[in-house]
Amino acid sequence: MDAPAPAPRAAKFSIPSIIALVCAILSFTTGAILGLILACVAIFFGLLGVVLSFSSRTRGGIVSTFSMLAGIIGIIAAVIKAVRWLV
């Protein structure tokens, strides 16, 4: 006899994708230096979230991609904030 199939588990968002999203949002609300650091963290965790989203049990690929794009925009915003602060 065949064993009963295990109940399907709902796919969950990966923790790196959530961290990336939070860091990307916070990078816009802080100063130049902390914004730059948070944007870099968002890009790193976004990349990690994209890699983890290839698993069928994990979601968050789109969130991670959005976070990486927001991180890149956050770096640009941090550079603009730094230039405005210097001038």
Image (cartoon, grey):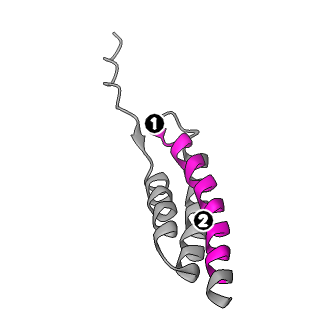
Q: Reply above or below: 45 against 84.
A: above
Q: Nearer the viewer, residue 53 or 27?
A: 27
Residue drawn at 58 percent across, 80 percent down:
32
Crowding at dot 1, Cα within 10 Å, few <14 / some 14-19 / many 20+, comes out as: some
Callout 2 secondary element: helix
Q: Nearer the viewer, residue 11 or 34?
A: 34
Q: Give the residue type at disc 2.
A: Gly
Residue drawn at 55 percent across, 74 percent down:
35
- Give the extent of the magenta segment: 57-82
Crowding at dot 2, Cα within 10 Å, few <14 / some 14-19 / many 20+, comes out as: many
Q: Nearer the viewer, residue 51 or 62?
A: 62
Q: Quadrant of the N terminus?
A: top left
Q: Residue furthest bottom?
A: 86
Horizontal and vertical percent position of residue 85 = 61, 86
Residue drawn at 48 percent across, 75 percent down:
30
Label 1 and label 2: CA atoms lie apart by: 30 Å
Q: Nearer the viewer, residue 16 or 31?
A: 31
Say which mark, if any, is on residue 74. 2
Between marks 1 and 2 in the image, the one whose residue lies nearer the viewer: 2
Say which mark, if any, is on residue 39. none
Q: Residue furthest front?
A: 87
Callout 1 secondary element: loop
Horizontal and vertical percent position of residue 74 = 60, 65
Horizontal and vertical percent position of residue 14 = 45, 49
Tell me if 51 is positioned left or right of 12 in this view. right
Mark 1 or 2 closer to N-term?
Answer: 1
Q: Quadrant of residue 71?
A: bottom right
Could you tell me how many numbered marks the image carries? 2
Majority secondary structure of the magenta segment?
helix
Q: Give the residue type at disc 1.
A: Arg
**Magenta residue check for 74:** yes
The residue that disc 1 covers is 57
